Image: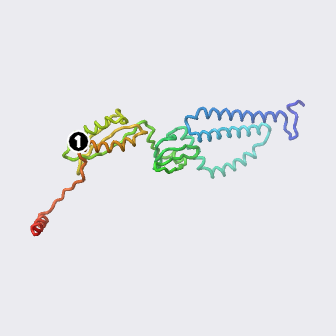
């Protein structure tokens, strides 16, 4: 009997024990290598909390697989363990369908990256700023300051509107002027004002045109582009500046007007009453 086939007290040989230890050690080494490379490759792509969760998932999955392989190498029967694990897996599977769905959706969100931390978005009528994207859920801070946790399966299956994914955003006003005002002059005033703002893009160029002949006004459509991170400030600023610039040039935004027609009998009654008062 050589050293490697020598049986220990538990019936395990020295060779089997060494094999068991080597497999466990190899699993630990591989798990650490995977964890380090996961952090190196994905640290710029996913949030820190999500990256930590991914590292733990990969690390412990490899350790568990290594442990199962090590048990098999020493002759340990896995049939009973597999049966028990299968039954337990079915029970857990029914109980954790939502969790698994959120987990898979979270991985798809991380891979596809339709949103990232700091983006202004609208997901399933929840509008706000993305605060965190985790394995199971996404946190959004609404523009009112309310934190909303959304399951990742709902995020992934919803229509996602990302307001800052593109570097620039277009917005528009509808501005009415009086019928007796010069529409060409109004367009010239507005275009000149837009051309002086440093955050309004030159390309695509702003657009000013007559869009509608309304009941009380000639309605001009004003369109412009601004950086996505500054568009709202430009939007609120320019709306007031356009109003002031038009008034400075004698162009007014009209009040609603109505034409009222009186029948001849009503006119006669009004005239008679006025004469009686005099």
Residue 172 higher or lower than 33, as above or below:
below
Residue 70 picture quarter:
top right
The local crowd at label 1, few if under 14, some if 14 to 19, many if 20 or more residues have their Cα within 10 Å, is few
Percent coordinates x, y for residue 98 in the rendering: 58, 50
Going by the image, does 131 lie left or right of 212?
Answer: right
Q: Nearer the viewer, residue 179 or 33?
A: 179
Q: Nearer the viewer, residue 144 or 57?
A: 144
Q: How is the image coloured?
A: rainbow
Image quarter where the N terminus lies is top right
Residue 148 higher or lower than 206, as above or below:
below
The residue shown at (79%, 33%) is 19
Percent coordinates x, y for residue 131 in the rendering: 52, 44
Mark 1, secondary structure of its residue: loop
State the residue lying farthest toward the top: 2
Residue that numbered label 1 is attached to: 249
State the residue lying farthest toward the right: 1
The residue shown at (30%, 41%) is 222
Percent coordinates x, y for residue 107 in the rendering: 57, 41
State the residue lying farthest toward the bottom: 276
The residue shown at (48%, 44%) is 129
How many numbered marks are there? 1
Going by the image, does 226 lie left or right of 140?
Answer: left
The residue shown at (80%, 37%) is 74
Percent coordinates x, y for residue 242 in the rendering: 29, 42
Residue 275 picture quarter:
bottom left
Image quarter where the C terminus lies is bottom left
Q: Nearer the viewer, residue 82 or 277?
A: 277
């Amino acid at each position: 009997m050589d050293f490697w086939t020598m049986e220990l007290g538990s019936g395990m040989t020295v060779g089997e024990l060494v094999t068991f230890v080597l497999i466990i050690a190899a699993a630990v080494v591989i798990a650490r290598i995977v964890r380090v490379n996961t952090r190196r490759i994905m640290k710029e792509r996913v949030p820190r909390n999500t990256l930590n969760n991914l590292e733990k998932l990969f690390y412990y999955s490899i350790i568990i697989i290594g442990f199962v392989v090590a048990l098999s190498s020493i002759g340990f029967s896995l049939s009973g363990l597999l049966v028990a694990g299968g039954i337990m897996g079915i029970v857990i599977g029914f109980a954790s369908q939502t969790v698994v769905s959120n987990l898979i959706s979270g991985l798809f969100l991380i891979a596809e990256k339709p949103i990232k931390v700091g983006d202004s978005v609208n997901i399933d009528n929840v509008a706000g700023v993305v605060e965190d994207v985790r394995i199971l859920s996404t946190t959004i801070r609404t523009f009112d300051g309310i934190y909303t946790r959304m399951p990742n399966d709902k995020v992934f299956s919803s229509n996602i509107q990302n307001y800052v994914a593109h570097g620039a955003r277009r917005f528009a006003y509808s501005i009415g002027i009086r019928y007796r005002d010069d529409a060409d002059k109004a367009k010239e005033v507005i275009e000149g004002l837009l051309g002086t703002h440093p955050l309004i893009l030159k390309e695509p160029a702003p657009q000013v045109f007559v869009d509608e002949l309304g009941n009380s006004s000639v309605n001009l459509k004003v369109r412009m582009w601004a950086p996505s991170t500054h568009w709202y400030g430009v939007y609120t600023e320019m709306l007031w500046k356009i109003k002031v610039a038009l008034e400075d040039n004698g162009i007014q935004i009209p009040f609603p007007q109505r034409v009222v027609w009186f029948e001849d009998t009503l006119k006669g009654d009004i005239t008679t009453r006025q004469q009686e008062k005099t």
